[in-house]
Image (spheres, rainbow, N blue to C red):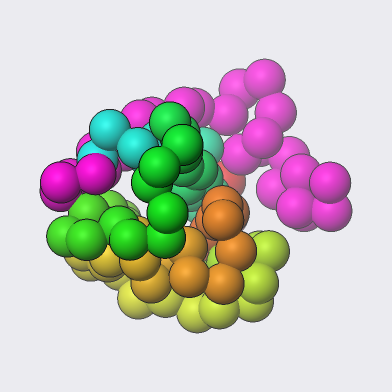
């Protein structure tokens, strides 16, 4: 909720929604989308039997850097493996660091 207060334009009624493409062998097991230009959500789906092995599954992050609001981890932009993005917590909420936020 604190993040919603910090970035009202991103999460408010006017905030845009854009699906992000997950690629790799287990891409069907993840959903990712971007709100505005400063927040990316990554969640697993169809998890029965998935385990923690994401294999070659990855996500292309828009220009960053990014910080996971749930774990504090820092991430660069570019293609990143879901195995790394979801290693410490089963979902990720990434926020763009620095600069003006929508």
Number of marks in the rendered image? 0
Q: Is residue 15 visible?
A: yes
Identified at 43% across, 66% down, the residue is 85
- Find the residue positioned furthest to the top: 13
Identified at 56% across, 52% down, the residue is 91
x and y percentages locating residue 32 in the rendered image: 41, 39
x and y percentages locating residue 46 in the rendered image: 43, 31
x and y percentages locating residue 37 in the rendered image: 45, 46
Which quadrant of the structure image shows residue 79?
bottom left
Residue range corresponding to the magenta coloring: 1-26
Is 70 in front, or is 9? 70
* Residue 71 appears left or right of 97: right
* Residue 64 appears left or right of 96: left
Which quadrant of the structure image shows residue 31?
top left
Is 72 in front, or is 26? 26
Q: Is residue 98 visible?
A: no
98 to 26, vertically: above or below: below
Identified at 49% across, 27% down, the residue is 16
Is 84 in front, or is 98? 84
Identified at 75% across, 53% down, the residue is 3
x and y percentages locating residue 53 in the rendered image: 33, 61
Let me know if residue 42 is in the magenta part: no
Let me know if residue 23 is in the magenta part: yes
């Amino acid at each position: 909720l604190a993040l919603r207060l910090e970035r009202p334009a991103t999460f408010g009624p006017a905030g845009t929604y854009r699906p992000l493409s997950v690629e790799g062998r287990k891409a069907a097991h993840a959903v990712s989308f971007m709100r505005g230009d400063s927040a990316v959500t990554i969640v697993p789906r169809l998890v029965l039997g998935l385990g923690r092995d994401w294999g070659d599954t990855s996500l292309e992050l828009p220009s960053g850097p990014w910080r996971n609001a749930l774990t504090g981890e820092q991430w660069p932009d570019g293609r990143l493996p879901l195995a790394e993005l979801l290693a410490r917590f089963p979902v990720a909420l990434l926020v763009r660091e620095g600069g003006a936020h929508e």
